[in-house]
Amino acid sequence: MRSSARAKALLVGLCCLGVGGGGLANEAGAVASRRCLVVTGSGDAFFARNFNPFASPLDFTSGGIYEPLVVATNAGGGRVYKWLASDLSWSRNHKTLTLTVRSGVHWTDGRPLTNRDVLYTLTAGRRDKALDQIGLTRPGNVVASVNLVGSRQVAIHLKAPDSTFVESVLANNLRVVPEHVFAKIRNVGRWLNPHPVGTGPFAVVERFNTQRYTLGRNPRYWLRGAPHIPCIERVLGSSNQSVVLQMVNGDVDLTNMLVPRVEKAYVAHDPRHYHFFYSAATTPVGLYLDDTRYPYSLAVFRKAISRAIDREAISQRAEFGYAPPVDAIGINKIWSAWMDPRWSAEAKTLASYNPAAARRMLLTAGFTYKDKALFDPRGGRVSINVKVIASWSDWVTAWRIIAWNLGDIGIRVKVEAVPNWGSWRPDAFSTKVGTLLWSNAVNGPTPASYFAQNLDRAAFVPSGKSAEVTGNWAHFQSAEGTRLLKQFKSTFDRRKQQRLAGKLERLWLDVLPYVPLFAGPQWSTYSTKHFVGFPSRQNFYIQPSFSSSDYVVALTRIRPA
């Protein structure tokens, strides 16, 4: 998912912050001490009080309120943080993973976190699909059983060894929830959970309205000394321009929004305190089509599109150079060490801008032209319909460039601007229209999860269904990819995994499930006037997007300036 997907606009009017709940007090040009870290985004709809981690929750629900067992990240060269699981150990045959539940952790209602809560979290999906965080009800489920071991441990028994299980299933976006609360809810998928009970550092809802909400420090938080600040205030965002204005004025401390020409537009106003970190060591943004629909189902069609799009123009004109182009496999900016050098040249060529080559590919495959309009081999006019959030100026520009590029090879592109996230998400996440999307927030130590999202039969989502759980936005599956991924998971030998990654890359170039375009930076534009400790180039300890669970690491490190 786009790192700033929940954050792309700003509060209509300036928000005031005082000791009571955040805000800004200006007196003779001086900024008063601020209580809450003030955070905003862009493209927000009015906030609904929804802290259910399984039903389109608000920011900081995952991480701030509900915590993961493990955090795995490629940040800083790759790190694993043991979180609510204080220890992980594999059996000799690598088919049983035993995790130890951290002691001394309490829910905000005072009850202790137990291994029963973790057992419930892992297995509740069998009773309610909305709670299925580990794929128990999906094809390709690898978990045979889960059981308690003593008073502090949980054993997960796998059907076969899986070296990627921790990074792809247990880490980051798996949220541990209290059994004594969730087990009483009949339909979790429709529950808003307005008064959450969590273990996270900011699990107390202090105040809430449709334009801002404040999450207060958990007085029972288990990590000694953390969090270092009393609260987070999330304010509504409506447009890029208003976000920049509030950031420059000092009304906001942090946004996950791209600020165009950020050095001049923001940093120059206060070089001592105003900073940005646009991490490009990420999975790519790309063009996803519904690969079950003709002619999108033709690999040659997707390859022709790849040759027709000017990635460098998008990078420079839409993303202001902060999002470098990627090759046709899409892992060269995040997992470059896993790239097989045998395919590098081909991956680069397939991503190079050459509309003439694209037209030749289409003609060879049986496509035809009539008055410069492209028709598929069945005689249908080739077109793509697109929706984009009007305030996401970078993606609006990107789509203009893509529309021009595809128009040059005869493809009709219709771009519809919609007002906000809520009006964009349903069609985008089911790929009912062609759209730009993130792969899910995959940033672990290997590219296995990235390949699995796009190739594995277990991740496949049928046409018209939301792919939010598995990241299979293109509705694509490959029998060969499934087989290779099974082999990858079955070995803990890095050299064997490297060879299998090369085979997956070869397959990828043959089928091209979607069209990677440019690295999808995790935008972080922030001020250190009131708070410090944010992820940065100098201190890259976690990816800087606050919309994912792994940001919990940052929430425990950010402190008053």
Image: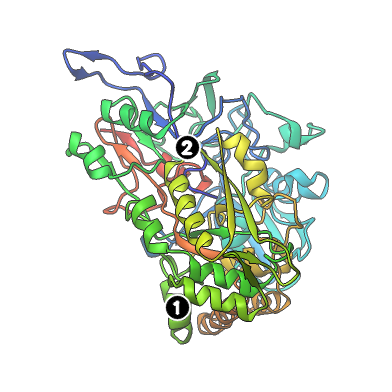
Q: Position of residue 168 (x, y in %)?
A: 60, 61
Q: Position of residue 276 (x, y in %)?
A: 30, 45
Count how many numbered circles sit on residues in the image: 2
CA distance separating discs 2 and 1: 34 Å
> 53 or 44: which is nearer to us?
44
Is residue 442 visible to us here? yes
In this view, 208 is above or below 303: above
Q: Is residue 423 left or right of residue 554?
A: right
Q: Position of residue 29 (x, y in %)?
A: 17, 17
Residue at figure coordinates x 61%, y 56% from the top left: 170
> 144 or 248: which is nearer to us?
248
Q: Which mark is residue 7?
A: 2
Disc 1 residue type (three-letter): Thr
Location of the C terminus (image quadrant):
top left
Q: Is residue 7 left or right of residue 198?
A: left
Q: Is residue 461 left or right of residue 163?
A: right
Q: Please give the residue where the numbered disc 1 appears in the rendered image.
A: 349
Badge 2: few (under 14), some or many (20 or more) residues near its Cα, within 10 Å?
Answer: many
Badge 1: few (under 14), some or many (20 or more) residues near its Cα, within 10 Å?
Answer: some
The label nearer to you, 2 versus 1, is 1
